[in-house]
Amino acid sequence: MKIAVFDTHQFDRKALTDANKSFKLDLTFFDARLKPETAVLASGFDVVCVFVNDHLDRDTLLALRTGGVKLIALRCAGFNNVDLRVAKDLALPVVRVPEYSPFAVAEHAVALMQVLNRKIHRAYGRVREGNFSLDGLVGFDVRGKTVGVIGTGKIGRVFAQIMHGFGCSLLAFDAQPDESLVKETGITYVKLPQLLAESDVISLHVPLTPKTHHLIDDAAISQMKKGAMIINTSRGGLIDTKAMLKALKSGHVSAAGLDVYEEEEAVFFQDLSGQVIQDDVLARLLTFPNVIITSHQAFLTNEALSNIATMTLANIQAFVKWGKLQNEVKAD
């Protein structure tokens, strides 16, 4: 079977090529993102392999089915970019990588927090220009602070463990409390309003669904402790960016570390350094000294890339060789 791999970059082509030495699948790489206009590229392929910013709406899925595609393999954990109901109606199964390295993402969340807290990004820029002043670089001891963890799945769990090591008081919000995490870290599960009101740092680790879309909006921000820091390494749509922008301007939110952005599809994973950014909200955020934005790179470690490639190809091989749907994602 032939596999079309969309939205590829140097780092994942290498990881997939290395992993494929064991699987020996027929891979064809495309730079283009999968969307209605590029779906024709998949014509004649049996499987499409896609990433977080490929757009699998009704039109794309119809084109894929017409072109003979039999399987959609996501090389990521999130699946909010796929219309699962349409995929089901078209008998197009969807598989994903449910876990690749929770450590990679959790550690990046901690890195964003500490860069913002200790003003590392500002200090680095100053020293490079010969400015060794410490004015404006005061941070806080993380030890003893209250950290709110929204979502304690695999990544949220690791993040909580790391913050426990820092000596933080931990609050969590999750529909399914992890009792083993409570015993290990002393984390306390509370209602969302309490977490928002008491946390000095809030880190998001839940998937993007209709229920979690704009989980952090004007109403939620109004419940936060004044001066709280927000970290998001999950999905951009969890935050109403315009609401957060207002809160940053007023000082109600002290800082934001964002590895994701709700309109990132038009921007992330591209070199736009020679262009004017057309997204006014993103452009405004980039002017704030208390905002760090990384381009959806929390997953980007050697270990995670290797795990993603291996699991993606294993999912495809299970379907190709044995007709087995491994790590299938189904519509609710």
Image (spheres, rainbow, N blue to C red):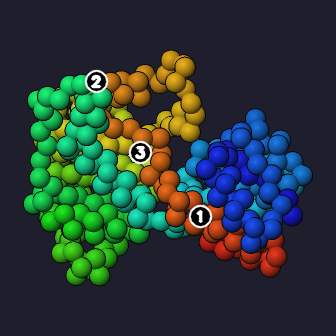
CA separation in Å, label 3 and label 2: 27 Å
Label 3's element?
Answer: loop
Callout 1 crowding tier (Cα within 10 Å): few <14, some 14–19, many ≥20: some
CA separation in Å, label 1 and label 3: 21 Å
The amino acid type of the residue labelled 1 equals Ser
The residue sitting at 30% across, 74% down in the picture is 177
**Which residue is denoted by mark 2 in the rendering?**
129
Residue 305 in percent (x, y) is at 57, 59
Residue 179 in percent (x, y) is at 28, 80
**Which residue is denoted by mark 1 in the rendering?**
306
**Which residue is denoted by mark 3 in the rendering?**
259
Out of 26 and 170, give the one closest to the viewer.
26
Q: Quadrant of the N terminus?
A: bottom right
Residue 180 in sight here:
yes
Left or right side of 241 for 218: left
The amino acid type of the residue labelled 2 equals Glu
Q: Marks 1 and 2: which is nearer the front?
A: 2
The residue sitting at 49% across, 57% down in the picture is 301
Kindly indicate the quadrant of the structure image that contains residue 93: bottom right
Q: Quadrant of the C terminus?
A: bottom right
